Image: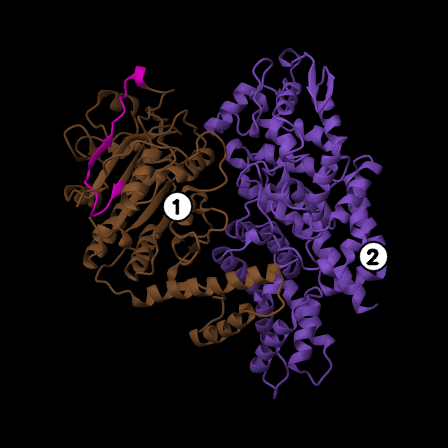
Amino acid sequence: MSNADVLLMAHLMRRAGFGANKGELDKLVKNGYDKTVDYMLDNDPNIPVSEYMIRRYQPDYGASLGSTTNGANWMYRMIWSDFPLREKVALFWHGIFATGYAKLANGKVLHDQIKMLLKHGLGNYQNLLVELSRDPAMIIWLDNCESHKGAINENYGRELLELFSMGTGNYTEEDIKEASRAFTGWTIANSDYMTLKCQRDSVWPYGRLSMHFEYNPDDHDEEEKTFLGETGNFNGEDIIKIICEQKATAKFISRHLYSFFVADEPPVPEWPYKEPNDPEAIEMLSKVYFDSGYNIKEMLRFLFKSDFFKSEDVWNKRVKSPVELVAGTLRLTKEFNRPSRDQYFTTLNAQYMGQWMMSPPSVEGWHWGTEWLDSGTLVERVNFSSSSLGNKDNIGVKEIINNIKSSLDSPIDSEKLVDASLEQLGALSTSENTRSILIDYADSNLDSSEEINDEEIAELLKFVGAMPEYQRS
Amino acid sequence: MSDKNNRSLVVVQLSGGNDAMNTIVPYNNGIYHDSRSSIHLTEDEIIDIDGSLGFHPEMLQIKNLWDERKVSIINGIGYPSPNRSHFRSMDIWHTAESESIAPDGWLGRTIREIDPEHKNVVTGVNFGRGLPRSLQCRGVPVASVGNLDTYGLMTDIQGSENRDYALSFFSRLYGPHLGRDVILEALGENGINAMIGADILSSANEKYSSSIEYSDTPISNNLKDIAKVIFADVGTKIYYAQHGSFDTHAGELVNHAKLWKDLSVGLGDFFDDLKEHDKEDDVAVLLFSEFGRRIEDNGSGTDHGSGGVSFVMGGSVKGGFYGEQPSLELSEQVEGDMKYNNDFRSTYATLLDQWLEIDPVPILGANYEQHDLFRKG
């Protein structure tokens, strides 16, 4: 297998998953690139491997948990799932349909929402929007339960158009009102009681209850509506159908997919004013969107197999989000083979770096790209990746050190050692400058008279974890 | 009053919902005793203030500062339509926005206002891991310090010589290079800033000397670290620390007493330390909590309520009562809680305008009536 194949596979795995070490990359390269893409997309495990294990450690898994425990369990799945793309796609949607614990005070409904995203996130986009509109966490988060026939609350109607599908500038204020009218009656069972429970943040008397979607025909506005130029007695499904037919929607979703999987785009609020990095790619993705009948899976299949994705120009052109950094590092170190308390505490690092799963800062979700970086969060990022990769007691690090040693022919020099380390950690590429600094460090650290020992390699891995290039994806 | 350039604000968040009624206690009010059949403090226990209100018995050091007129007590503080979820209510206090979900925190916006060009990477320093929402604001760097003794980059490298050696390589990795892309540029700039910030803060640690011996509790450790950075004169304007958990649904009498004891002792030492370093007039301390608790107890504790108490302390404050002590009469209650009578954003506005001398309107989004908290001249 050629080195170019390994580098390309490393790029694919950083984007479609949370990265892979050299041994894993070699296996995938043998299977072939296209087959790997298809396998990741088409394999549909009924039960994600780790669910039972999580339940063993968290008996109330999915019940009364708060955002932090929920996030830690999700992180466990990201670390160990054989289908990391599914988790990644759910994370993608969680960033867009950002729903937060602050208002819900109920981990159960958020857990259920993430499960919904896992189940429908790779499917038909129209269907996903219907599921989202019926999702109890979303109904409370954006107040659709407060929207009534004759007295609409526009919150959901507005964000559905602005943040979840079309983007600003493609509809009028009137369209927002009409969409909101169409979604009246889309509520949760026992909504007064449930919203009160959220406001009171009370576990009494029955704990944190599941919530269920309920359509209340008596509260639904049955009058005629005009939405995006079409007129009829529309219900929520009709609005979503019309939304999905729009070119703006195709472009908006394509741009989101590009930004998350290919290369960082500017923050969403700037989209109306800035052209995409690669307008042609967005065009092609939009075409697949219509040709496939709004199928996200087919859009991703096209994306991963496209020249614009494979091009070296976009390799490492994303800043790892905190969750990607933590999950990717823990997949290498393999230090948590159980969803233990320690794994929970380690997951908090993503929070320290600025990304608290299930608690996004606002309806807009997180701002990605270089906005993850500031002098405070970078201290957390560097210290986390450096200390995890440099801890030779971690099972995965031990394996990597052994593989580095066995891949080196004697006489060992610093150059070979640095190259082997970058290779084993997942075919990482660096600037020539970074590589030469790592070689200098290895030079000063290696005792040439003796055989190379694990401690010396671990010291070097600390620097690989600390180098700027490790912060990119 | 002190020179505005030397002033700083220390915010201590009392997480979990501090029971205002057992902090500033209406000890001779019959409704208080009737509603708190299990969780009440008696006239013999409290530290009397004015014949009707008293401090919690463990607030001895705060009482001493009160006697020196360095404590302002803001009773009945809150916001319209109280929310009793910890997360939402804390979010409201953090963002100063009670209607919608705001994207950033009021102190983050304050730091951006003070230092729009990020000339000083330690304008805001948080003590504790992870930034609270109040300090978050896009593009505004804030250092988060778990423990000043061990703060820095690559701290798992043992031995100061080894670490200095390692950091010399770190600075080469993040130093300026030709041919970088946007991402590496951003990493380079922030990497160097992180190193500078860590150096500034660890120098504060080295320079510190004091005769005060703080006790070994988390809040005292944080207050001591804050004092160190204040004395180092590195230009920090906003300090933040958290203390808790005040979520006393059960075992309140014991737990609440311990919480206030630790805080009161810590603040007593902190103010002694400030006095020793002649900094008392330069520092204002704000204590706040996301809500108060129910008027009626639940047998061993109290549940989430509304209407709280905040404190502003320092050598430059006037001292005394602000806001009003909410009536406990049934007709005056809000769903079994004390009713707020002054918006917390009035206190924020006062601190911004009168203390930090920056325009509060862009930060708080509206004009709020201010308290008269500080001595003039």
Residue shown at the point (18%, 45%) measured from the top left:
B65
Look at the image and give the residue range highlighted in magenta: B312-332
Residue shown at the point (57%, 27%) measured from the top left:
A155
Determine whether, in the image, residue A384 is placed left or right of residue B224: right
Please, is residue B195 above or below residue A409 in the view? above
Q: Which one is nearer the viewer's eye here, A473 or B155? A: A473
User: Residue B277: percent from the left, percent from the top?
Assistant: 21, 59
Give, as a three-letter code, the residue at label 1.
Thr
User: Residue A236: percent from the left, percent from the top?
Assistant: 69, 22
The residue pinned by badge 1 equals: B110
Give, as a three-letter code, the residue at label 2.
Tyr
The residue pinned by badge 2 equals: A33
Mark count: 2
Write down the chain letter for disc 2: A
Write down the chain letter for disc 1: B
Please, is residue B101 above or below residue B265 in the view? above
Residues at marks 1 and 2 on the same chain = no
